[in-house]
Image (spheres, rainbow, N blue to C red):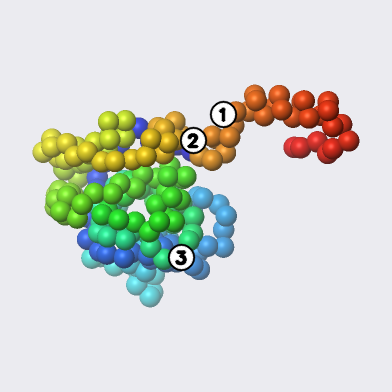
Amino acid sequence: MEKFTTLTGVAAPLPMQNIDTDKVIPARFLKTIQRSGLGKHLFDPLRFDSDGKERPDFILNQDGYRNAQIIVTHENFGCGSSREHAPWALQDFGIRCIIAPSFGDIFFNNSFKNGLLPIRLPRAICDALIEDAKLGGNARITIDLERQLIVRPNGEEIHFDVEPFRKHSLLNGLDDIGQTLQHEHMIGQHEARRRERQPWLPTTV
């Protein structure tokens, strides 16, 4: 998993509530278990019309926001059905951080496990950041995970909360498997002792 330390990038303003996971990545695109290639389907019903043509009014189709790395939005982002493809699609598009007043619980948890940082902030602050984001590429936002700060284009610093374990995992690029492999030496010692004491049991791979 890619480490998340400090990110400075363009933020896309998306002032919408209740963007569910089917809007993030529709169910018809969930046939793959590959994490790559999903970005082209991100927000498909919002980005494209029924003929597959881009909707020019959608923010990520507009010049200056096609390479956005941050999304600032409203309440309950990522609600709806559980699908790990949602953070996969966001990351494959290039999004590394979502800022919103609240998130769907499963999406929130899945994001951390896949290197995507979801930040909860009050609606009034999100609205201020949305106004910043509307200024486009000349108004970049910085996310400093180590210091737990968002730096606005005008230099104002906004503190955000993140659980220490999740912060550690993101800073060090550790998903669930990576966290387990930190104890690889101890696991190897345990398996060696088990083989000595119980040689009749199958060897784990």
* Upstream in sequence: badge 3 or badge 2: 3
Residue furthest to the front:
197
* Upstream in sequence: badge 1 or badge 2: 2
Residue 72 location in percent, x, y?
A: 25, 52
Q: Which residue is mark 2?
A: 174
Is residue 39 in view from this perspective? no
Say what secondary structure mark 3 lies in: loop
Residue 12 location in percent, x, y?
A: 25, 52
Label 2 near label 1: C-beta < 8 Å? yes
Q: Residues within 10 Å of mark 2 (few under 14, many from 20)?
A: many
Residue 114 location in percent, x, y?
A: 46, 45
Residue furthest to the left:
154
Residue 141 location in percent, x, y?
A: 21, 41
Type of residue at label 3? Ser
Query: Which residue appears at 47% of the width and 45% of the height?
Result: 113
Say what secondary structure mark 2 lies in: loop
Q: Which mark is residue 81?
A: 3
Residue furthest to the right:
200
Query: Which residue appears at 14% of the width and 51% of the height?
Result: 128
Say what secondary structure mark 1 lies in: loop
* Upstream in sequence: badge 1 or badge 3: 3
Query: Which residue appears at 57% of the width and 55% of the height?
Result: 33
Type of residue at label 2? Leu
Image quadrant holding the C terminus, namely: top right
Q: Which residue is mark 1?
A: 182
Type of residue at label 1? Gln
Query: Which residue appears at 49% of the width and 59% of the height?
Result: 83
In the rendered structure, the answer to whether residue 149 lies left or right of residue 88 reads left
